[in-house]
Image (cartoon, rainbow, N blue to C red):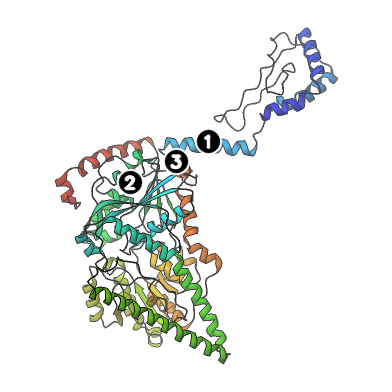
Amino acid sequence: KEGARRGWRGGSRRSASREASANRSEAEGVAAAPEPASISPESSDQPEPASVSPASSVSPEGGSSSSLEPGPVASAVTPARERRDAGADSLTARPRRRSAGETGFFKNRQREDDASMNGSNGSLRDPGRSVAIVTTASLPWMTGTAVNPLLRAAYLARRGLHEVTLVVPWLTPAEQKMVHPNVIFDTPEEQGEYINKWVKERCGFEPKMKLDFYPGRYATDKYSIIPVGDVSEYISDGRHDVAVLEEPEHLNWYHVGSRWSDKFRHVVGVVHTNYLEYARLEEHGAVKEAAMRFVNSWVSRVHCHKIIKLSDAVQDFPRSETVNIHGVSPVFLEVGRRKAFATAAATAAENDPDSAAASAMGRTVNNLIRSFGAKRDRRRSEERAREGKPPPAPEPEKIRPSTEVFSKGCYFLGKVVWGKGFNELLRRVEEHNTSEAGVAHPLKLDVFGTGEDFDDVTTSARQKGLPLEFKGRMDHASESMHDYKVFINPSLSDVVATTTAEALAMGKYVICAKHPSNEFFSTFPNCMVYENPEQFSQCVKKALSTDPTPLSAKDRYRLSWEAATDRFLDAADIKEEQMRGPGTGLGDKLGETLFAAVHGAAAKHEKMRGVLGAGQ
């Protein structure tokens, strides 16, 4: 069209003179040049120039008359006619440059073609796409692989542009007691109701995503849930458009059935866990680490078009990109906002007795209201028990953000297993308290969490005489956690610690090791990073003797799930490096096909599954 419009503007006024010139040329035997080639999406941005005959007039509809037959070259051309013909033909004889819109269109067209060749097409930002987010854990188990995929699904569905399904494991009531003993469900529907209530309580909106369950079993040797059967068969949405595999290696260790990348148009894997670090801590750790590195890489690349690493703390994967796509729920940001307000009010009250008295009265009223509410709940429970009524359905804890200044010291929250950083934690506390800085600022720590190594960890802390108080399981959003000022997380096995993000959102100081898992957090003003025991002690001294800086609006947004969802949508698309980089060659594709066939055959063999720990 553009060519037609240019030809129409350039040739309309001179059509008569050009025709006369053409007739003279024919009479004199001037050769006619071939017509220009049309530009297709497959052609280059700068096609070879082609001269156009003056006799080829262009109509408004874009049609052109046929070229004249070539003849002998004229012996003489007058300068006037040369200038006139050059002016008439200047718009059509030169190669036409594509407009910015055309260039963008053709580049997008080429990108889509390349993505299609790699087994995927389109962008996840396209409205109307169907997205199934599959994970390896579910509430009320408060682990990162339960919370973060749930919030990713809830916030993606909230935008109203995608059809979102969250796919989570279902455990029998007997196995639920090993994972979340305080809350047991008889049916998946009960658990689904609990999950939806939890989202509404924490985020303030009704979740719009669908929930599907697949059968799982709790593997006590792995401290995790293993899928049973082909998980993709339990996804109710039959479109099979986009699958997001949270922990793709974990989901596919024992996968049976077709490849996810054969069944879905676009498959994205999100790597949450540093399994190599756990393997390294076991007996024959070097051998187990090498074996796990190989298996994790291949089972992920076989099933995924694109892999997102939350940080570079995990191993390398082909067709991968490193982006932190997690956020925190609004309740943590609200705690931080209120803490900043309380700190500002307390500072003002130092010079204003009336303001101080009003603040004290407000705290007294709030405490009375909370006390009356707790008594009312206990009375209702006792009345139901006396009347023989069944207990009410399990509900998430209601969160009431604190309005007080930070009044407690340091704490750590996490699963109590040695691999979660407890070796480092005990060592750092012992080194600090025996140092010069520790004499002036001794470190006492409250530890929240339970786990398989709880007895060993508590015994070791007691034998070393460390001032650690173990307080058991606790939700990080619980009101009793709000008043701690300093969160200490020395773990070197995390990929991205959800608890660290939550502590920063609540306006606390965070003390953590210089490590790839903490790269994102280290850009926040309240995050203090150390590389050696001396720096750790300096961080503790500063945290105990000063107050944290209130979060800026920009940092609050960076921690939010709105920002994390945007980062996810950007990272999930297949880019140039995933199309033509490592893992995209013909040999790689053949290797993946061979590995998938061998792995699939082994996963269907019950005895082999038993030997490898998958169970029946």
What label does residue 579 carry, if any? Answer: 3
As measured in the structure, the alpha-carbon distance from the residue carrying label 1 to the one carrying label 2 is 31 Å
In this image, 101 relative to 242: left or right?
A: right
Q: Nearer the viewer, residue 148 or 38?
A: 148
What label does residue 235 carry, if any? Answer: 2
Q: How crowded is mark 3: few (under 14 residues within 10 Å), some or many (20 or more)?
A: some
Q: What is the secondary structure assignment of the residue under circle 1?
A: helix
As measured in the structure, the alpha-carbon distance from the residue carrying label 3 to the one carrying label 1 is 14 Å
Q: Earlier in the sequence, mark 3 or mark 1?
A: 1
Q: What is the secondary structure assignment of the residue under circle 2?
A: loop
Judge depth for marks 3 and 2 and give the one in front: 2
Pointers 3 and 2 in contact (C-beta within 8 Å): no
Answer yes or no: is residue 82 visible. Answer: yes
Quadrant in the rendering for residue 437: bottom left
In the figure, 96 relative to 324: above or below? above
Measuring from the top left, give residue 457's x and y in whole percent.
Answer: 24, 74
Q: Which residue is at 78% across, 23% downward?
A: 12
Q: Nearer the viewer, residue 550 or 476?
A: 476
Q: What is the secondary structure assignment of the residue under circle 3?
A: helix
Judge depth for marks 3 and 1 and give the one in front: 1
Q: Nearer the viewer, residue 593 or 120?
A: 120
